[in-house]
Structure formats: structure tokens, C-alpha cells
Image: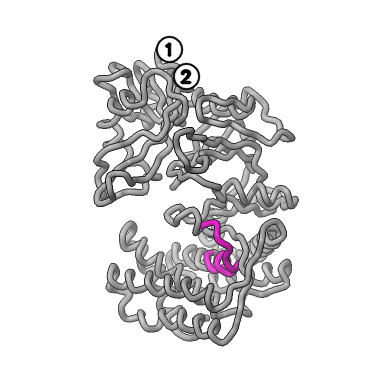
């Protein structure tokens, strides 16, 4: 376990327990919504600033327990707990609560990332390559970090938290963490070695090495250059849609950027060949997810046979001897994972993959068409986010994106319609379940895609 400094980990966590049970489920990045938190167990605790001063700072890794998971299970979360006697009004949104007993009794605790001073402590530790307990603050020795950069929290994050330092760097702090090689650090480092400028190269990163655990270190945060003045692809697409502007030039450029990243990843990391035996479990997984989705969302039932045909068509191709090349990919590609700089250049970010999937699965080689299917679904989502919907806009963007991809890769994704349809279908089925659970008003968006994909010719 990471070095524990006074107050002791059990005493600290016990005093925070009732407050965290209320606060944690309200956070956008908390994955266990819909089930109460029944308790916490410590993974590691490190004091970064002593609590006996004006400002304290504790780094916690805690496991949150929720039924019906067994007592020893539970997601591990990274928390940065600030400690003050009283919270100034500017930090009111960060409030966790007032501690009534234990080592912090009489103090107020809060999410420290809202506070520039604690956030700047993290950057200074990365700049100096500090080692504090089991925390390892590391950086590329060839990349400098200036001191004195003012921190500000970005509030638009969903599954993690990000802090910008003086419009120079952005620190992505992973909230739900697992031990092992995290693709959000692994892939950008590999792309940097290949000289791929489409992905900001990691400047520094934070890991936790837990001495009494056999598991690999935890990757906790990644610091990368901040793309000044950039607009994410989702915001840009909606803005152009609202103005009735054409987006095909941007879609083509984004296709080229995607192909550059895929090409560099194929050079940097091993590729494999997928045949019938490798594809069979993937098709089985798609089929199982469809069956579960139909049970969860009855509106899918009329389309079940048509959607399943997308998977059986892929299985038939593999049975006939067709093979595909698989490589490392982004894993969760959509318009919101792309940034357009004022110069017009596109960058791809957030290589974590789908956080709900196991880490080993996120690191498996996949056909590049899985990424492409995600982006094509994203164009469709954008087109249905305006009133009236603009399916023609989506069709033009999809075509332009594929054409741009072919210009760099030499392979047009549309020349493999069976695999592309299978991945699009799998994504749309996932979207139906997600929207039914979290945003019922959005359910018609993936259902419109389901109607299209359930036909043998979904174009």
C-alpha cells in the first residue's frame, strides 16, 4: 500500500464514509448509478498537504461497495480530498460535507480539483518527478513543464476530470481506475514515438505502485499539451448544422486524421489476423448483447431478426474463409473525441476506450472498422439532434469521412459492408439500451438507425 501519513487510512476513511456515500453517487463520473453505496474499503491513501495547516490535501484510492456485488468487489475510485476549516463561496460546487468526528472533525472537505492551489500541487509534483508514498509522478525528460501555471477545472467531463494549466497543458485525471497498462497513456506514447502529430504527446503521467498488492501499477492521470482555441467535433458539427452549413470538408479531413492514427498504430504495435475461430466469439458477444437489449427495451423486438442478420452475415463470411487484419485502435471514437484546432487540423483524444469494458478487452487488437462505425454513428446522432432531423446531412458526412479515410489508408471502409454493418449494429443496439435507461427522450435517435440497419442493405 502507498505510504500512509497521519491521519491513518482507516480512521480517515471512516470519518469520510457517511459524506462520500451521499456525494459520490451524484458525480457524473460515478459508474454505479442506480444502486446505493453500502461502504468503502481503502486501497491507498497519501497526504499531499498536511491537514493541520490552512489547506489540507489527501489523495485516496477507495473501493466503493454496492449490491449485489460481493463484499470484496467494487469499483476503485481516485479522489482528491481538500480540507479547509470553512469553504469560500467560490468553492461551493465542490463541497463534499462537514466532518463531525475522526481526525478531520470540525473541518470541511471538498473535491480539491475545483481549487487551483491543490491542482497546482499536482502539476508541481509532475514537474519535479516527485515520489510521495506509492505515488509516482513521472514525465518525459525531453519535455519541460513551466512552474507558475494557473489551474482551472473543466466542467464538461463525463467519465473523468480534467484540469487546464494556463492554456498550456491539460491533465486528465482518471476517476474509476484499474491496475494495468492503460491505453490512454500507452497509445499516445506509442503514437508519439511514431511521430504522429494527430494525437497530443504525453508530457507527464501519474501512477500508483501499491507494495502489498500483486497487481500492476495503476495509471491515474496523464498530462498532455492543451490545444488552444480548439473546438470538439460534436460542438462544431451541431453549430454547423444549426446554421445549415455543409460539413463534408470537415468530415473528409477527420477521415484523413483517423486513417493517419490507424496507420501509425499499425506501425507501432503488433497486428493480428482474425479468421473464423477468432471472430466466432465476437459474433457470439454481439448476438448475446442483442438478446439482452431486446429483453431490456421491447421497442427493439420488431427488428431483432433483421439486426441478428447483420451478425450472421459476418459469421457466414468468416466460415467461407474470409479474414481481417486487427490492430490497436481508439476504441471509443466519436465526434466528441476529436478536436479541431483554429488552424483547421484535427486531433484525436481520449484513448481510454469504453470504460465499462474490462481493460484486457480494451487493449485487444480490433479491426479499424470498429472505430469507423463509431464515427459514422456519431454523424447520425448529430443529424438527429436538430429539429427537423437532417438524415441527408449525415449521409453526406458519412460518405466524405470514408472518402477521406481512403485517401490516406488506401482502403475505403465501404468496401467491407458486412463487417461495417455488424459493428454499426452492435453500436446502435448499445445506444438503444443506454438511451432507454438514461435519456429516454433520445431513444428515437438510435431506433431510427436500428430501422435502417435491420435491412440487408442499410445504406
Residue range highlighted in magenta: 362-374
Figure disc tally = 2
Q: Nearer the viewer, residue 368 or 164?
A: 368
Q: Is residue 392 above or below residue 439?
A: below
Q: Nearer the viewer, residue 323 or 335?
A: 323
Look at the image and tell me whether residue 268 can be seen.
yes
Residue at 25% from the left image edge and 20% from the top image edge: 101
Q: Nearer the viewer, residue 388 or 335?
A: 335
The numbered dot on residue 53 is: 1
Q: How is the image coloured?
A: one colour
Q: Is residue 234 left or right of residue 438?
A: right
> Quarter holding the N terminus?
top left
The numbered dot on residue 111 is: none
Q: Residues within 10 Å of mark 1 (few under 14, many from 20)?
A: few
Query: Residue 251 placed where, x, y %?
Result: 62, 64
Asked if labels 1 and 2 touch by Cβ distance under 8 angstroms, the answer is yes
Q: CA distance from mark 2 to mark 1?
A: 8 Å
Residue at 56% from the left image edge and 52% from the top image edge: 351
Q: Is residue 375 above or below residue 209?
A: below
Q: Is residue 220 above or below residue 232?
A: above
Query: Residue 20 placed where, x, y %?
Result: 30, 34
Q: Secondary structure at mark 2?
A: strand
Q: Is residue 25 left or right of residue 115?
A: left
Amino acid at each position: 500500500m502507498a505510504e500512509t501519513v497521519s491521519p491513518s487510512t482507516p480512521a480517515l476513511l471512516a470519518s469520510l464514509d457517511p459524506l462520500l456515500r451521499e456525494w459520490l453517487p451524484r458525480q457524473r463520473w460515478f459508474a454505479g448509478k442506480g444502486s446505493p453505496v453500502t461502504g468503502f474499503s481503502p486501497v491507498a491513501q497519501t497526504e499531499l498537504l498536511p491537514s493541520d495547516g490552512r489547506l489540507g490535501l489527501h489523495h485516496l484510492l477507495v473501493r466503493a461497495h454496492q449490491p449485489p456485488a460481493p463484499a470484496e468487489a467494487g469499483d476503485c475510485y481516485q479522489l482528491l480530498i481538500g480540507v479547509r476549516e470553512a469553504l469560500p463561496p467560490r468553492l461551493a460546487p465542490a463541497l463534499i460535507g462537514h466532518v463531525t468526528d475522526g481526525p478531520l472533525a470540525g473541518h470541511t472537505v471538498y473535491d480539491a480539483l475545483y481549487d487551483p492551489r491543490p491542482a497546482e500541487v499536482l502539476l508541481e509534483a509532475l514537474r519535479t518527478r516527485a515520489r510521495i508514498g506509492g505515488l509516482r509522478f513521472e514525465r518525459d525528460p525531453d519535455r519541460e513543464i513551466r512552474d507558475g501555471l494557473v489551474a482551472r477545472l473543466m466542467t464538461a467531463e463525463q467519465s473523468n476530470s480534467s484540469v487546464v494549466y494556463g492554456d498550456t497543458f491539460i491533465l486528465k485525471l482518471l476517476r474509476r481506475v484499474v491496475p494495468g497498462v492503460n491505453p490512454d497513456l500507452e497509445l499516445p506514447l506509442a503514437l508519439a514515438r511514431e511521430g504522429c502529430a494527430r494525437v497530443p504527446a504525453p508530457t507527464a503521467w501519474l501512477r500508483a505502485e501499491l507494495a502489498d498488492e500483486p497487481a500492476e501499477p495503476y495509471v491515474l492521470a496523464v498530462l498532455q499539451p492543451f490545444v488552444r482555441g480548439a473546438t470538439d467535433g460534436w460542438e462544431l458539427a451541431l453549430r454547423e448544422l444549426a446554421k445549415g452549413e455543409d460539413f463534408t470538408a470537415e468530415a473528409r479531413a477527420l477521415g484523413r486524421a483517423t486513417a493517419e492514427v490507424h496507420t501509425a498504430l499499425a506501425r507501432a504495435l503488433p497486428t493480428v489476423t482474425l479468421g473464423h475461430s477468432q471472430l466466432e466469439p465476437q459474433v457470439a458477444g454481439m448476438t448475446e448483447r442483442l438478446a439482452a437489449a431486446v429483453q431490456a427495451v421491447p421497442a427493439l423486438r420488431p427488428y431483432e431478426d433483421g439486426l441478428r442478420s447483420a451478425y450472421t452475415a459476418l459469421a457466414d463470411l468468416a466460415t467461407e474463409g474470409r479474414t481481417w487484419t486487427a490492430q490497436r485502435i481508439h476504441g471509443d471514437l466519436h465526434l466528441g473525441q476529436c478536436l479541431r484546432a483554429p488552424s483547421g487540423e484535427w486531433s484525436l483524444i481520449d484513448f481510454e476506450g469504453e470504460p465499462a469494458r474490462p481493460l484486457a478487452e480494451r487493449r485487444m487488437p480490433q479491426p479499424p472498422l470498429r472505430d469507423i462505425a463509431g464515427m459514422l454513428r456519431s454523424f447520425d446522432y448529430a443529424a438527429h439532434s436538430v429539429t427537423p432531423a437532417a438524415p441527408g446531412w449525415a449521409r453526406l458526412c458519412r460518405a466524405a469521412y470514408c472518402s477521406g479515410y481512403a485517401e490516406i489508408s488506401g482502403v475505403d471502409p465501404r468496401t467491407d459492408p458486412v463487417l461495417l454493418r455488424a459493428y454499426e449494429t452492435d453500436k446502435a443496439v448499445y445506444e438503444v439500451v443506454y438511451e432507454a435507461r438514461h435519456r429516454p427522450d433520445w431513444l428515437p435517435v438510435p431506433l431510427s438507425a436500428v430501422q435502417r440497419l435491420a435491412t440487408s442493405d442499410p445504406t
